[in-house]
Image (cartoon, rainbow, N blue to C red):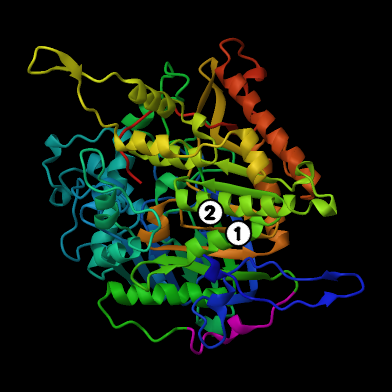
Amino acid sequence: MDQLHRTETTHIDEVKRTSVFTLQWQLELRNRKSIATHPISHNNKLQFFICGQQAFNDILARIGDAEASIDLCCWGFDPGMELSRTRAADWPRGPTLGDALIRAGQRGVKIRLLVWYDTLGCIFARNMPGYSHDLTPWYCRRDQQGADEISAAHSMALLAGIKRAPFHLAGYLRYRYEDFPVPARDIPALARAEYCHSWYQAAARNQLEGIELRTRSGNRRAIEASLATEKNLPAGLSTAEFEAMGLEHLGSHHQKTILIDYAHNGGLQAIGYVMGLNSVTDYWDTTEHLLEDPRRERGGKKEAEECVQALRDDPGFRTLKPYQDYACRIDAGRALIDVHDNFASAWARAGGEPHPASTRVNPPTALLRKAEPGDSTVQIVRTQPEEGPDKTIKEAYFLATATAATTHGYLYIENQYFQYEEWLQFLLEKRRSTVRQWLQKKKENKTAEDLPVMYVFIVMPVPEREQMIPRTYDALATLGQQDRMTGQVIRIKEENERKPHQVRSGFGTTAPAPRQLPEVVQKANATDKPSALRLEKEYGLKVSTVMLNACGFDNGKWRYREIYIHSKLMIVNDEFLTLGSANLNQRSMAVDSELNISICDAAHARDMRQRVWGLLSGGEVTGGGGSARDIKTAFENWQSIARENRSNRNSKSGIGDERALKGFILPLEDGRSSLTRLG
C-alpha cells in the first residue's frame, strides 16, 4: 500500500531545527490533475444521522420536496417499509417508501430505482419483498388492472372490503371467500404482502408513473479477477471450506445511495445520501434501542427463540431486534458529482447500455461553488469489481490506518463484520514500525513509558452465522482478543487435545491412526496472538472489543437482547471518518460493489465521536475535547462500564435499577463454535 502516499517537500528552519508537514488522510494520488479518478472536494455540507428513525424521517421529507429527479441505488428495496412510524403496532404505521415514490412520480418527478437481484442469492437475502419472495399474495392484479390505485391504504381497504362484501369483490380473489377466512389480526400482514407484490408488478411493467426499475447481479468474472489481487485468498472447496465459491458465485451490489434533484436548477437543491442503512423495514429503529418496540416489525420464529447467550432461559421476543446504523447527507457539494457518476454507470450496465461518457464533464454549476466555512473535504470511494477493479475503500482504510499509526490517539471501529485479517496485520506492522522508531530515539530521552499509545475501540455484533465464527476469531486473535470467542477457544483446544483413534496393524498390535487437524484449527494454531502486555509494549496498542445489548424491565424481570450492529463506521483521531456500505471483510473489500464517503474534517469527526460514544455509554463517556488524557480516560471508563454492564446482566438477584445497563456496551462474548469457514 506504499503507492498510496504522495510525496511532499518540506523546508527545515535551520535556527529552530523544525519543519512543518501535513498528514495525508485521503487518496491524493487518485486526485491528480487531468487523471483524477476519485476527486477530493472541499465544498460539501454534511449532516449525519444515527439509526433509521433519524435518517428515514429526513429521506421522507426530501422525497416529498423533490421536483425533478430521484435516483436510488439499493441492496434491497421494500415498498412497504414505513419511513416515519407512529406507535401503532400494525402496518401501515406511517407513510410507506413505495407510496412516497408513487406520489413523487405523479408530481412529474423522474425516479430511477436500481436494486441488486440474484435468483439464488435473494432466496437467502429476502431483500425485495414482493419480488424476491412473497410472490403469491392473496390477490394478484391482472395486467394493468388497478395500477393507478396502488397504495398502502387501498391494500388495507381491499381486504376490509372483502370481509364486508365478499361477493361484490369475488373477482379479485384467488380463492372462494368461504375458503379464505381473514381474521382481523392477519389483515395488515396480508395487505402488506399484496401491496409489495402489486407495487413491484406495476413497476416492472412501467405502470407506475415516473418510476423506472432496473435490477443488477454480481459479475463472476470480475469478482474472480478482483479476488486474485487479494493478499489472503478465500478458502477453497472441501468438506468444510466453501468460502471461495460463495464469494465468486454470490457477489452482490451493496451500495446504498439516494440522489435527489441532482441537475434541477443547476444543482441548487441537489442533495444525496450515502448510507449503511438498507431500504428494508428490518433496518428501522430508534437510538433508544428499546427492548420491544411495536414500531419495529413483529418477529417470527427466530425472535421467539432469541435469547442472550448467557441467559438461555429467556422466553424470546415479539418484535425484531434493535438495529444500529448510520447515514450521511450531502447538500449541494462536488461529492454529489461522484455519487451521480457511480449511479449513472451502474444504471447503464444494468440496462445493457454503453458506458456513459463521464458525468463529471459539465456538471451542475451550483455544485462547483467555492468552499465556505463549515464545509467538509470529501472523497467518494468504492469497491467495484466491474471497473478496474476499483478498490479505493480498501485503500482508504489502509491509508487512514497508516497515517494514524504514526501518531497517538484512537481508532474507533463500529462494523457489522470484523473479519479482515489483512487490514489488522497492516495495522500491527505500521504500529511496530512506529514503536521501533520511537525507541531508537533514546538520545532525545524517548522511553517506552513515554510511548504514544493508540487506543482501539471495536464495536461489533456476534457473528450472525456460526460459519462466520472462524473468520471473526482469526481477526480478533490478530489483536489478542480471541478470548472473546469463548466457544471457539474451547473448540480449538478440544480439537488439539483429541486423542487419535487406535487402529490394529497386521501383527495384532495397535497404533494411533494418522490424523490431520481441521484447517480452521490449523489456521488458529498458526496465528500469532499477542498478550495485552505485549500488544502495548511491542505495538503501543490498547484494545477494547464490545458488543451492544438493549435492556428493559418486562414481565416482572430485567431482560436483555442483542442490538444488531449493521454499522460501517470508522473515526480516527478526531481528524478522519468514513461511513457507507462497506464492511470489514473480504466480501466488501473485493467482491460486492460498495460506496463509502471518506471525510477529512476535525469538527465532524469530533462531533460524531462525542455523539456515538455518549449514546453507547449512556452519556458516561464522550472523550471530551479529544486530548491524549481525555482519550485515555475515556478508554478506561468505557472498559469499566462494559464490565459493570456484564455484571448487571449476569446477576441472578435483584429486580431494581441496579440490573439496568448504562448505555448498551458489554464485553463481546460468543459461546458458539464452528469448524466451517464462511466469510
Query: Is residue 19 a member of the stretch shown in magenta?
Result: no
Image quarter of residue 187: top left
Measure the C-alpha gap from mark 1 to mark 2: 8 Å
Disc 1 marks a residue whose amino acid type is: Ala
Q: Please tell me whether mark 2 sits on a helix, a strand or a loop.
A: helix
Looking at the image, residue 41 sits to the left or right of residue 80; the answer is: right
Q: Is residue 60 above or below residue 39?
A: above
* Res 75 → quadrant: bottom left
| Disc 2 residue crowd, few under 14, some 14–19, many 20+, Cα 10 Å | some
Q: Percent from the top left, x then y, of residue 243?
A: 29, 47
Residue 368 is covered by the magenta coloring: yes
Tell me if label 1 and label 2 are in contact, CB under 8 Å.
yes
- In the image, residue 270 above or below residue 311: below
Outermost top residue? 653
Give the number of the disc on residue 426.
Answer: 2
How many numbered marks, from 0 up? 2
Q: Is residue 2 left or right of residue 155?
A: right
Q: Which mark is residue 272?
A: none
Residue positioned 61% across, 84% down in the render = 368
Q: What secondary structure do most residues of the magenta stretch adopt? A: loop
In magenta, the rendered stretch is: 360-372
Q: Earlier in the sequence, mark 1 or mark 2?
A: 1
In percent of width and height, residue 582 lies at 46, 56
69 and 207: which one is in front? 69
Q: Which mark is residue 402?
A: 1
Q: Is residue 59 rendered to the left or right of residue 513? A: right
Instruction: Place residue 198 in its image quadrant.
Output: bottom left
